[in-house]
């Protein structure tokens, strides 16, 4: 007879348990076959909240270092999900605008904030969502979706080449450098070049609500000139203020 025991633990990103639940399964095998009457569950409940080590003191613990002891050790907390317990500014809910560090400050899996962004990818479709799971196909469409949604003000662009010009909108920012897994690096790194082919225009827009219209970590190419010796302008800013261009 072979016996197996299992202890269920919370996973990264799962809701915190209100109680500690121990579930032990005793499995009996006979000749390699397993029947319904060979599975016995023994359950016990302790009315104790689990606690997790919080080494950096930010109020969020590391679920990989937890305890179900009813006497909570010092520096252990109930909240968990900290993806870097050695850095106090990194924890769920922390501010996380994409920047040159390319780090995930709010532990949602990307450099940036999933809930405040529309997403663009070469294989996307210009639909109503433009979410990380259902990205849109063009930067222009993503900007339009963000303009219609007060909860979003960012556009995150996956590596690839996107044809057509883009008109910036006040208080909306476009960030590039995301690879096929939405990991972010410098635009010059292999697999991270987000290219806008057709130019970008900012006409008559002004930064508002403390948020600047921004282009960051992108490659912008101007459209083909209209004829021989005709100008091709990649970024045109006119009658505007507060526009930020970074790492273009």
Image (tube, rainbow, N blue to C red):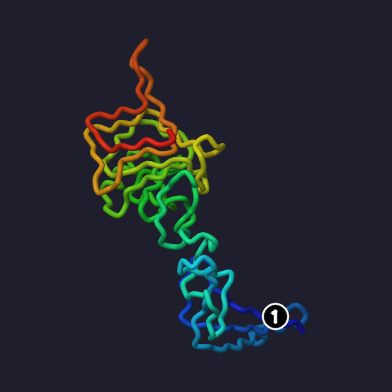
Whether residue 153 sits left or right of residue 25 in the image: it is left
- Which of the pair 244/126 is nearer the observer? 244
Whether residue 191 sits left or right of residue 210 in the image: it is right
Q: Is residue 247 above or below residue 44?
A: above
Residue at the extreme top: 228
Q: What residue appears at the point 25 percent right and 36 percent down from the top-left corner?
A: 241
Q: Is residue 244 above or below residue 45?
A: above
Q: Can you identify the residue that label 1 sits on?
A: 4
Q: What residue appears at the point 45 percent right and 69 percent down from the top-left corner?
A: 59
Q: What residue appears at the point 23 percent right and 37 percent down from the top-left corner?
A: 205
Where in the figure is residue 69, as x and y percent of width and height? 56, 83
Q: Is residue 219 above or below residue 10?
A: above
Q: What residue appears at the point 21 percent right and 34 percent down from the top-left corner?
A: 204
Where in the figure is residue 97, as x and y percent of width and height? 40, 50
Whether residue 68 sits left or right of residue 121 in the image: it is right
The quarter of the rendered structure image containing the N terminus is bottom right
Number of numbered discs visible in the structure rendering: 1
Q: Secondary structure at mark 1?
A: loop
Where in the figure is residue 196, as x and y percent of width and height? 41, 32
The local crowd at label 1, few if under 14, some if 14 to 19, many if 20 or more residues have their Cα within 10 Å, is: few
The quarter of the rendered structure image containing the C terminus is top left
Where in the figure is residue 143, as x and y percent of width and height? 32, 42
- Which of the pair 2/69 is nearer the observer? 69
């Amino acid at each position: 007879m072979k016996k197996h025991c299992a202890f269920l633990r919370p996973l990264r990103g799962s809701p915190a348990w209100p109680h500690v639940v121990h579930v032990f399964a005793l499995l009996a095998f006979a000749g390699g076959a397993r029947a319904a009457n060979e599975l016995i569950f023994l359950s016990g409940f302790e009315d104790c909240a689990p606690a997790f080590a919080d080494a950096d003191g930010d109020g969020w613990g590391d679920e990989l270092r937890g305890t179900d002891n009813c006497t909570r050790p010092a520096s252990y907390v109930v909240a968990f999900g900290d993806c870097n317990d050695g850095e106090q500014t990194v924890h769920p809910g922390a501010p996380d605008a994409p920047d040159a560090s390319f780090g995930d400050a709010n532990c949602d899996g990307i450099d940036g904030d999933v809930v405040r962004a529309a997403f663009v990818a070469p294989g996307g479709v210009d639909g109503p969502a433009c979410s990380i799971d259902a990205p849109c196909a063009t930067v222009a469409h993503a900007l339009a979706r963000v303009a219609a949604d007060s909860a979003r003000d960012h556009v995150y662009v996956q590596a690839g080449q996107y044809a057509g010009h883009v008109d910036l909108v006040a208080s909306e920012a476009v960030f590039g450098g995301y690879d096929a897994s939405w990991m972010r690096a410098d635009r010059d790194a292999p697999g991270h070049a987000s290219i806008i082919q057709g130019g970008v225009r900012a006409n008559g827009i002004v930064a508002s609500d403390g948020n600047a219209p921004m282009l960051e970590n992108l490659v912008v190419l101007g459209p083909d000139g209209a004829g021989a010796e005709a100008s091709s302008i990649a970024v045109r800013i006119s009658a505007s203020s507060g526009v930020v261009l970074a790492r273009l």
